[in-house]
Structure formats: C-alpha cells, structure tokens
Image (tube, helix red, strand yellow):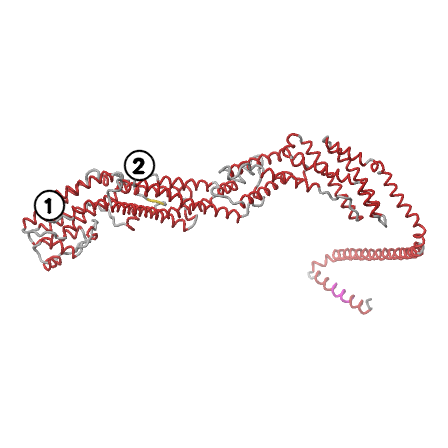
Amino acid sequence: MGLTTFDMNQIESEAAATAAKHVANMLQRPDQLEKVDKYMQRELRKKASVDGVLKTAMQTQLDGVQTGLCQLEAALNEIKEINKDIQEIKESLKMVPELVENLYALKIESKEHSQCSAALENLEHILNIPKSVQDALDMINEGKLLAAHQSLAILEHSRDDLLYEMHKLANQSPTDKNMLKHYFSDVEKLSEEISKQLWLILRRTLNSVRKEPKIIVSALRIIEREESEDAAAVDLFKRTGYMPIGRPKQWRSKAFEVLKQSVLERIEGNQFEDRSGHKMWLVTHLEMTRQIIVEDLRVVKSACVPCFPPKYQIFEEYVKMYHECLSGHLQDLIGNSLEDNEYISLLTWISGYGSAEMLAHPDLNIDVTKLPPLLEKTVIQSLVNQYLYNVKKNYRDWMKNALSTDVKDWNHHEGPDEDESGYFHTQLPLIMYNMLDQHLQVAQTVNKELVNSMMLLSFEEVMEFTRLYEEAIMSYRNKHFEDRSIVKYFTSYMIATSNNCLQFCEFADKLRIRYSKDLTAISKNAEIIFCRTIEAFLKLILLVLKCLREELFMDLSSNLNEVMTRTWFLSGNQIVDTIHATLEDYGSDYTHLLPENFNLLITDVMNWIAVNYIYAVLQKRMSFKSYEERKQGAEKMCEEGKILQQLFQRAPFNKRLNSIVKKRSYYDGKITLENILKKYSPIQTSKTSPFEAVPLIAEVIKLKDVSMLSLELSGVIRHYPDVTLEQLVTLILVRGDVSKNEAKQEIRWVIPLPPSEDLPIWQQFSCR
C-alpha cells in the first residue's frame, strides 16, 4: 500500500523533531559548538553510507525480478513445446495397433530364431550328453572333481538354456518339456554323484585336511561355484519366474549338515563299552570325548581355517557343532538312566568343560561364556539332587555296615587297638572320616555349591549316626550287665568308644575347616546341625563314662553298703582295702582313656565313692554303745577317708592332676567340652578332694561335748554350703546321744557362711 502525502509530511516532521533533539543533546555545553563542523561531516558520512546501502538493496531486488521474469518466459516456451510433442505422440500412437498386426509374423520368426540359436549353441553338448556324462564319471573315479564339475556345469547350462527358451513361449508344450528333462536326466544323476563324493570328502575333513588339504579345497571350490549358480538362479526367477531344475541346491548348508553329522559320529562313536561290560565305562567314554574334542578343534584351528573361506568362520562353526552335539549326547546319556557314581562323574566332567583341560585349552582359548549352557540349569540340578540322594542312601548303608562291624568287634575275644600313646580306639572314626572326606573331595571337583550341599548332607547323616551309635552302646551295656561273663572286653571297648567320640569331634571340625570354615555361608541350618552333631558325640562320651562308672560300682556297691555297719566296725580296713584293690584294678584299664575322658571319669568316680560313703554313714546302720565306740568309728572314718584320698593321688589316678589336659573346643571355640558338661552332666570338678568331707563328718560324730556341735557344724556349712537342714539333723542323729529336737535346736545356732568353691556333693544324695 503506497504512502500518502500526509504520511510523508508526518514522517518528515518526526524526522525533523528527532534531529532537533539529537542536535540538542550534542550541543549542551558551549565548548561543543567548536565541534559543529566535525559533527556535520560525521552525519554526512553516515547519510552517504545509508544511501549506498539502500541503492544496493534496490538494485539487488530489481536484478532478482528481472531474472524471475526471464525464467517464467523460458518455462512458458518449454510448456508450449511439450504440449506440441504430446500432440505428435498421440497422433503416432494411433498407428500402433496396425503395426502389431503387421509385425506379428516377424515376432514369431524372432522367437523361433532365438530357440534355434540356443539349440545350435548347445548342439554339441546335446548330441554328446551320454559321452560327456560318462567322461565326467570317469573323472570322478580318478579324483578329478573340479574337471568333472566343470563338465556338469556345461551340461546344466545347456539344459537350462533350452528350458528357459521353452519357458518364454506363450503356448508351452508339457510334452516337449518332459522330453527335454528326460533327455537330460543323466545330468541330474551326475550332479548327485558329485554331491556324494563331496559329502564323503567333507565327512573325513579332519583326517583329510592334515594329509591332503588340496582335496578339501577342491570340494569347497565346487560348493562355492554351486552357491554362485544358486544366486544367479534365484535372481533369474525373480525377473522371469523361471527356476532351473534342482535349484537352489544349497550345497553349503548341506555341507555344514554333513560336518555336523560327522561331529556327532565322532562323539558317539568313541563309546566302546557299556555298564554291563565295564563299571567305569562312563569315565572312560567322557575322557575319550574330552581328548577327541580338544584334538579335533586344534586341527580345525590350525589346518581347516586356512582351507575354508573366511566367511565360513569354520572354527566358530565347529565349536558350535561340537557344543550342540555334545549337549544332545549328554542328554541321551542322562535319559538312559545313570547309576551310582555315574552322576558325579558326569557333573565333574561338565564342571571342567570350560577349563584349561577342554575349551579353555591354551591352543584353543574358547570363551565358554559366549556359548549357550551345555545343559539347562534344571537338568544340572536334577543330576545334583539325584547324586545327593544316592550319597545319602550310600551313607546310611556304609555307616550302618561300619557300625555293625565295629559292634561285632566289641564281642570278640581280643581287645581294641592302641595308638602310640597307649590310648584305646577302633577304626570306626577313621573309616567314617575317610568316607566323608572322599565324597567332599569329589564334590570339590564340581563346584563350591555342591561342596556346601555335601557338607550339609554329611553332617545330617552323621547326626543320624549318633542315634544309632547310642542305641548300639546301650544295647551293649544292657547285654553286659545282664551277664557280665559273656563280654570279656566290655571295659576296654567302652574306653575305646569314648575315645572314638572325641576323634569323631576332631574329624568333624577338621572337615569343616577344610571345606567350609564358615558354616553360615551354607545356611543357618548347617551351623545348627554341625553344633548338634558335636554336642551329640560329647554327650555320648558322658553316656559311655557313665556305663564305665556303673560297671565299677557294681563291684563296689556291696562294700560301700557295709560302711557304718557292725561288720565294717569290726573288720579293720578290709572293706576299704577291697575298694582300693578294685579301683587299682580298674585304674590300669582307665589309663587307656584319652586325658579328657580319664579326667571326667576319675572325677565322677571320686565324687560317687565319696557320696556313697557319706550316704552309708548317714543311714545309721549301727548304734554306738558308748562314746569310746563312737570315737573309734569316727577315727576309722577319718582313716578310710585319708586312704581313699591318697589313693587318687597315686598312680595311675594322679594322671588326672599331673597331666596337661588340653581344652577341647570346636567351631572356633563356639563349642567346648566344658560347656557341654555344664549343660548335660552332673560331673563337676573341684580344686579339693571330695573325701575332705569325711573328716568333717567324723569330727561331728566324734565330738564329746555336745555344746560344741554348733562350731563343728559351722565348719561343715562353710566348706559345703549346699548341705540341707535335714542332712545336718541326720548327721547329728548318727551320734546317738542327741534327740531330733535337740539336733534342730543346735542347728538354729549355726550362722550360714558365704558359699565356697568346694564340690556340692551334698546335692547328690538325700537322706532317707
């Protein structure tokens, strides 16, 4: 829209006002008037510059408009020419139908000429087909496969050219086509014969490539020729719809199928035996398979790679084929039902599949992680579960048989074995340890997970074994106590059994340290089972020692029952001498106990003799007729207490005091024999002899002045704070000169003293 005169005047007015304002800003001070000329020159230069820019812009726009007008004019002329040409083409097309009719005869002649030309070109081959085929067969027999294949290619080209010409005919004759196919039927047979030779060569690739690699190369060249012909045939089919007979042959794919079949035969063909012929058939078969795989892949890498085209990636393909065939073969083996140790043999072999002994061999360096799993995890787990089930079953049978053999030895007329230190033992702990260790060693060849599972299973079964062991011990004990003349070496084998239990604990902890130091890494249940197993064996020690103590007291009970009787009073030291002799007789056997067991048994025996002696005294089986008689009885008690105390301070019983007994602890100190004693056993150790209670009791009985009883009773309470009011009353009544009420009155004067560290033997019997 153009500018009006009013608009121009307004613009000029605004420009004048802006200029005036600009001049006013520049001339605000008097000294700036001197620079008016400079300001004018500067503004003139700016004006000239702006005018130049405007002129250039206008000229550029005018040039563009002129160019556009020229192009529009040229386009208009071209459109007119195109329109003219289109009209001429339309006029020419009106003549085409007439030309088709006029040239139809020429078209027929051209096709016939083309067919005749193809026939003339292949006439020599067509006429000589039988001879050419025979010559090619002769070349095959002579090993000239490349020449034979060249003849085949010529014959196939002749056949395909003729069939293609027939395909182009509008009215194809099936009879002519079938006749032509029949005439060239020998060519197809020749192709099959060459392919058979190729597959035979490829089936023996690993042998031939080392001796005559030239044969392999020739076979591969033929296959590549056929692949090129297949590609050309497929392209022709896309363009014309014609596919030559037998195409695509896909000989490369078939070649890999042949190679894979040969690999499968290599794997399956090395099984020379079965389970019925050889127990270790699977181990032999797997080892042969390992050797074959490693050797074959070494041949592929060193000899086949240079012979095969790079695009074949022959080494990678061979690895894949061996992997797949091996996977299928292993699944077949599993499907045919494995037995016993065959499971672990297979698991061990699979675990070494990616090791330096197989795929990771220095000559191969195959990364097995890039391959799919040899067997699915579910299959592997199934093998593991079945193996563990078999081991569990075998454990129970072996443990039962080992225990049965050990129990039979208990009834023999020969004593148990001795070690170099003279301690009795049997072979049962070592047999058990070796059995468990062997299975754990085998599991270690597979993986850590199987070791952990085997550890848990082993301790579970050992825990079950402790129950059977206890039943056998109790049965043996009951049989002996029914008739002690039947079992000759009861004491010796009970000693060996108690020593065995300590050995079991040592062996169990040794296995833990060797294979799984931290049981919580397996499971919390594993730690619990291990601790219970150790505790079970330590409790068995207490049970066996109790049996030994019971046997001893069967011989001592009659003598102890005579204490504080008239017979005892008149017999001098005969009773204690008998006890002394019996203890020394048994003591010679007890020296074959391990120090810990010896210490526990002798402590228990000392306590029980002291308890039963004091118990016999408190039964008041005799009445003293006078103070002199009571004094004589008390002195006899002191003398016998001293004799018994001295007995345990002499050999062999002083071994308990003089020997350095190591503290038995297991699972890094979490389980100790001391803790088990506190938890399950009445056996308690003391720094003083339990027979020191006898003189204290004797002094109470011997005391003549009844008014001094409270003092003597205070001494008893100070040393044995566990003594009860009833027991003190009974002790006073043994004197025979104090009534029950007077005895209670005396005790009221006794002031209880702080507890001492002496053995609380008074808790081990009650007054009747």
Decide which of 441, 86 is in the foreground and name it: 441
Residue that appears at 73% across and 42% down: 249
Work out whether residue 82 or residue 719 is closer to the camera in this orientation and state it.
719
Give x and y (percent) for residue 526.
41, 49
Identify residue for label 1. Answer: 636
The magenta segment: 12-19
Residue 356 seen in the figure: no
* Residue 484 locus on image (x, y percent): 24, 44
Image quadrant holding the N terminus, namely bottom right
Q: Which residue is mark 2?
A: 417
Viewer-closest of 171 and 37: 171
- Residue 205 on the magenta segment: no
Give coordinates of residue 291: x percent, y percent: 55, 35
- Please name the amino acid that badge 2 sits on: Asp
- Under tag 2, what secondary structure? strand
Mark 1–mark 2 Cα distance, whole angstroms, equals 43 Å
User: Is residue 584 left or right of 272 when viewed as pictured?
Assistant: left
Tell us which disc is closer to us: 1 or 2.
2
Query: What secondary structure prevails in the magenta region?
Result: helix
